[in-house]
Image: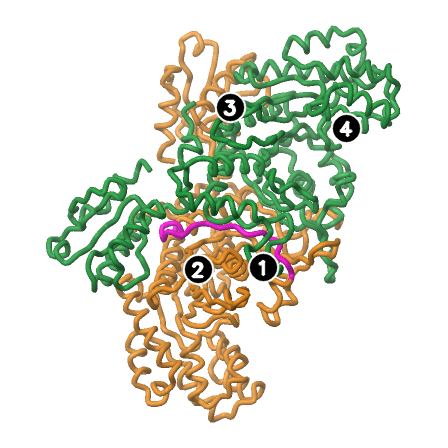
Chain colours: A green, B orange
Amino acid sequence: MLRPPPLLLLLTRCSAAARRFLSASRQGQGQGRAVGSVLKTPKGTRDHPPAQAALRERLLGTVVACFKRHGAAAIDTPVLELRETLMGKYGDNAKLIYELQDQGGELLALRYDLTVPFARYLAMNKITNIKRYHVAKVYRRDNPATTRGRYREFYQCDFDIAGQFDPMLPDAECLRIVYEILSDLQLGDFLIKVNDRRILNGVLAVCGIPESKFITTCSTIDKLDKVPWEDVKNEMVGEKGLSPEAADRIGEYVQLHGGLDLIEQLLQDPKLSQNKLAKEGLGDMKLLFEYLTLFGITGKISFDLSLARGLDYYTGVIYEAVLLQQQNDHVEDPVSIGSVAGGGRYDGLVGMFDPKGRKVPCVGVSIGIERIFSILEQRVEASEEKIRTTETQVLVASAQKKLLEERLKLISELWDAGIKAEILYKKNPKLLNQLQYCEETGIPLVAIVGEQELKDGVVKLRDVATREEVNIRRENLIEEIRMRTSQL
Amino acid sequence: MLRPPPLLLLLTRCSAAARRFLSASRQGQGQGRAVGSVLKTPKGTRDHPPAQAALRERLLGTVVACFKRHGAAAIDTPVLELRETLMGKYGDNAKLIYELQDQGGELLALRYDLTVPFARYLAMNKITNIKRYHVAKVYRRDNPATTRGRYREFYQCDFDIAGQFDPMLPDAECLRIVYEILSDLQLGDFLIKVNDRRILNGVLAVCGIPESKFITTCSTIDKLDKVPWEDVKNEMVGEKGLSPEAADRIGEYVQLHGGLDLIEQLLQDPKLSQNKLAKEGLGDMKLLFEYLTLFGITGKISFDLSLARGLDYYTGVIYEAVLLQQQNDHVEDPVSIGSVAGGGRYDGLVGMFDPKGRKVPCVGVSIGIERIFSILEQRVEASEEKIRTTETQVLVASAQKKLLEERLKLISELWDAGIKAEILYKKNPKLLNQLQYCEETGIPLVAIVGEQELKDGVVKLRDVATREEVNIRRENLIEEIRMRTSQL
């Protein structure tokens, strides 16, 4: 692929100190270092110091570039929503919603995700057709494992397509987007599992499960990626009250995974092919796989009947991407990071907000940016790589005293020309200190003014890496800096 | 200046419908259009539909580009802070802080600005030296005039320099940044007023005002930019309990504004030159003006003794930028927009968080992005300009039926190459509908596949604006699209 350079190539070598800093700030989440209890961020939240903020900016940049490549527009909604907007949308998880104190006026809460505000936005503005992305923070009063990249305040990166279209075309594009983002980020091998709520419901129906037990049975099925079938069966029988025979019948289906062959096989299945919902779902799944073949991405896709996903609002295709075992020997402590993207079709959510219940079919995907971020963070720590936190192209320096005026004049010219430039905030800084500052912060060039250079109408331009110095005529300086830093 | 193209040049022609939409969404803040009361955003907040989100992205892009040009690193801090972190920092305004409900655990609040969290971050991590920017939302339970671009949830764009440096060098750079941003945004003529808290305190001291009345007197002085001196004097005497003579003495000073001449004059002032604080402030002001002269920006700077600024934490130089009367005849209803940037030196705030009271001198500037945004919004509405909400370079289309497969194959190739491309989500879309979609959304190119083109190994590339069509060999298509859209 000829897309923007991969993220990790943008990193350069890193000092041990910088790595320690990154590491300390990751472990010390929510705590000051050696001071009283007051000096901390709230539980489950963290500051992002410059190295982390820069890494995150690049990561989000890659994700947003993909969303834009697919023609999405940005929208923004408030962090605050009316409590009633959020209530009744998250089932048991409603207890995790942060509520604001009643200080008079409306009762407010912090958004729990970006999907419900998106549905509220569509209904409120009677929008029936939009392709949008939204990158923003959401809030959950969870007890998250911060070491695994889970927080109470975290970013979500959502892409959704709303509107009535020909079947599976937007759904296929969402899967293509997951594929592109995970490829662009070079996180290692991955697999995108795909299923359909209608197929799952059909399976349960033909296995004789009453509809009242569909949801609870699904949540047990969903564990098949972590525990063996025997444990799942035991839970179905012991906790969910299914008969062993019914559980076995389910087991025959949900342990299946594959591609077009499996879809064809199930379309011929004597029981399943009699179920209207399952047949619809399988027909659409077949169409989806045809489109994914044309998109050239079926190698990373698995039709997996055990995928159920938690949220109630899905009505059709669902999917989830997982990273496969890292082959990267940089990483000393490989952690289980599980799902890094997920989504599906939710055709009923907007209708919940519309006063007349008008539906707007939607399909979308959410990129699990925090987990991906913690993987990248770990890689940086484990490697000799350093993330530059600034983009400064040149430091304006002097070798002798009493040249502050000349430095200020020169840097002004550079800023006027759009060059990213800094000076040390000292009247008479030592040249050594100025060069050291460049080494520490990764500034590639130094423009040195001195008595002789001023007389000669030149500036000495030093390459920090090679230590080569060359006199450049003042009128050519800007062009020279641009040329030398254009490939950085 | 040779910097990135100015914001408004990026705008293209706009349909009446799009303008009505922008307009409606601006006026309808916090409200759905014709539905029940539940379908709204919280009071004082608003959604940003795509056109606004795109405008804001460009505006923030210009501001952040300037911060980066000056070597700033990004940091991020949580939207939530411990209540005790915010308490005692905002004086009377503490009542405007949003508090979270006590749901067990820590007592939390939403941040009120970015400066206090920055100081908390510095003290918590014992950072004594950093140049950082932070662009993020803050929250105030105010009763804002949303029509004037004031909201309860709004963006702040802050740039701050923390550390012990030679006097006035970081301060001068902050003013240069305000100058660059307001120039780059082409908002019209502007003026940056500068004063120093020490000079103001010195003036009050030599006029015989007791220290206990400094703050309240300053808040009266601050009104001099809106009301005549007589009204200010009346408030001083009537409400603040100053003698008419003392008020007159103050009046002789605070009505002064000028440049280096005025500084020199005040340095010779028999009374003021005897006051230690005032003398220090005037000495620094002189140095500041020398640096601003070297930066070439004194034409937009006014040393103005009436500038006081509200916040308690300023300790030295303070400044505020105001837009001058718009000459732009596009704008039908010019609104008073007042201050669009402000800041100053606050050397004591970090020490309030440090357990040992260690001080970290800081100076910074905050760009009033919401007011600037509402000015730009108004200009877009008043003009025929339209903001493109997507960046799609090419629509992959077909002129005949049964070419969905070919469209999907071609768009896959384009995405692989990093081209921003869309298709209509229909199996057999009409060519007219595909062309209309390009017109509506501003897509400049259409790549048309047809039976004949497939046989000939070409794609018909259509320029939407000129309607010219030319056959491009398939292997040259990506290069051709890149070339044609590189200057967009």
Classify mark 1: residues with Cα within 10 Å, few (<14), some (14-19) or many (20+). Answer: many
Q: Which residues are magenta?
A: B66-83
**How far, Cα to Cα, is label 1 from label 3?**
40 Å
Classify mark 3: residues with Cα within 10 Å, few (<14), some (14-19) or many (20+). Answer: few
Where does residue A41 sit, x and y in percent of width and height?
60, 54
Q: Quadrant of residue B162?
A: bottom left
Give the camera-side residue of A427 and A69: A427
Examine the rendering and report whether any part of residue A133 can be seen.
no
Q: Amino acid at mark 3?
A: Gln
Classify mark 4: residues with Cα within 10 Å, few (<14), some (14-19) or many (20+). Answer: some
Q: Is residue A385 above or below residue B226?
A: above
Q: Quadrant of residue A342?
A: top right
Residue linked to disc 1: A39
Q: Residue at x 14, y 58 (%)?
A: A451
Identify the secondary structure beneath mark 1.
loop
Q: Are marks 4 and 1 in contact (CB under 8 Å)?
A: no
Residue linked to disc 2: B128
Q: Is residue B433 magenta?
A: no
